[in-house]
Image (cartoon, rainbow, N blue to C red):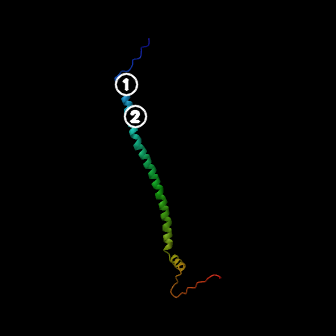
Amino acid sequence: MARPRRRPSRSSLALRWLAVLVLAGIAAAYVQPLRAYRDAQADVAHRQSEVQALQREQGVLSNRLAVARTDEFVERQARKLGLVRPGERLYIVSGPR
């Protein structure tokens, strides 16, 4: 013969619900820190890509600076400004009128 099922006591049900609520509270407490951690990781990745772009730009600018420090570059720029070396004469050739 099957025994009839006993209903759990009120205190037992209360403890079970309390345990469920505590676990739900703990889970809810972890949501914000996990979200902040994920956002921080995304921010770090974004900043790293910015650093890489700036490093590439720095390389390009360093190359331009190295070229700009050569005597040939300085002379070419000076001649574009209309400057001449001592003893040279500047001739300006104009086009047909």
For the point 47% across and 64% down, the residue is 58
Vertical order, 22 against 80 (above or below): above
Q: Estimate the x, y position of residue 95 in percent, counting from the top left.
A: 63, 81
Element type at marker 1? Answer: helix
Instruction: Provide residue 73's location: percent of width, then percent of height.
Output: 52, 76
Residue 76, compared with residue 53, is above or below; it is: below
Q: CA distance from mark 1 to mark 2?
A: 17 Å
- Tell me the quarter of the picture where residue 7 sits: top left
Residue lying furthest bottom in this view?
87
Which residue is at the far front? 97
**Figure check: 80 above or below 10:** below
Dot 2 corresponds to which residue? 24
Residue under the image location 43 percent in, 44 percent down: 35
Q: Which residue is mark 1?
A: 13
Q: Quadrant of residue 34?
A: top left
Badge 2, how many Cα within 10 Å: few under 14, some, many 20+? few
Mark 2 residue type: Ala
SS assignment at label 2: helix
The residue positioned farthest toward the left in the image shown: 11
